[in-house]
Amino acid sequence: MIKARVIVTLKSGVLDPQGKAIEAALRGLDFSGVGSVRQGKVFDIEIEGSDRAKAEADLKEMCDRLLANTVIENYSIAIT
């Protein structure tokens, strides 16, 4: 079994209204040291088998086809 974590974040320069709302809420809770907040998504995925190269290729395809909107989002894959 191969375990992987995929992290999807908005590309730099893409408006992040949810991040801005979280930023404002944190300031409202008196966390004055908070600068900028950007939100993202995390996917923990288990893949059957032991071929790490195939798993990484499959994960990239999953991201490109479903998990990330590659026009506005970046993703990173960590296989453990």
Image (cartoon, rainbow, N blue to C red):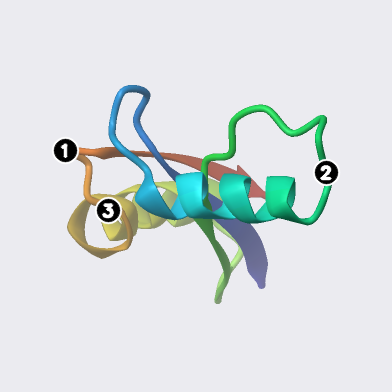
Q: Look at the numbered disc 2 and give the secondary structure of its residue.
A: loop
Q: Residue at x 34, y 30 (%)?
A: 11
Give left or right: position of 68 versus 43.
Answer: left
Q: Which label number is shown at residue 71? A: 1
Q: CA distance from mark 3 to mark 2?
A: 39 Å
Up/down of 75 relative to 69, above or below: above
Point out residue 59 in the picture as x, y percentages from the top left corner: 40, 55
Point out residue 40 in the picture as x, y percentages from the top left corner: 49, 51
Say which of 43 and 45 sits in front: 43
Give left or right: position of 47 versus 69.
Answer: right
Q: Residue at x 71, y 53 (%)?
A: 28
Q: CA distance from mark 3 to mark 1?
A: 15 Å
Q: Amino acid at mark 1?
A: Val
Point out residue 31 in the picture as x, y percentages from the top left corner: 83, 43
Q: Amino acid at mark 2?
A: Phe
Q: Which residue is mark 3?
A: 61
Q: Which residue is mark 2?
A: 31
The N terminus: image quadrant: bottom right
Q: Residue at x 61, y 56 (%)?
A: 5
Sequence-earlier tag: 3 or 2: 2
Sequence-earlier tag: 2 or 1: 2
Q: Look at the numbered disc 1 and give the secondary structure of its residue.
A: loop
Give left or right: position of 11 versus 25.
Answer: left
Point out residue 22 in the picture as x, y percentages from the top left corner: 58, 54
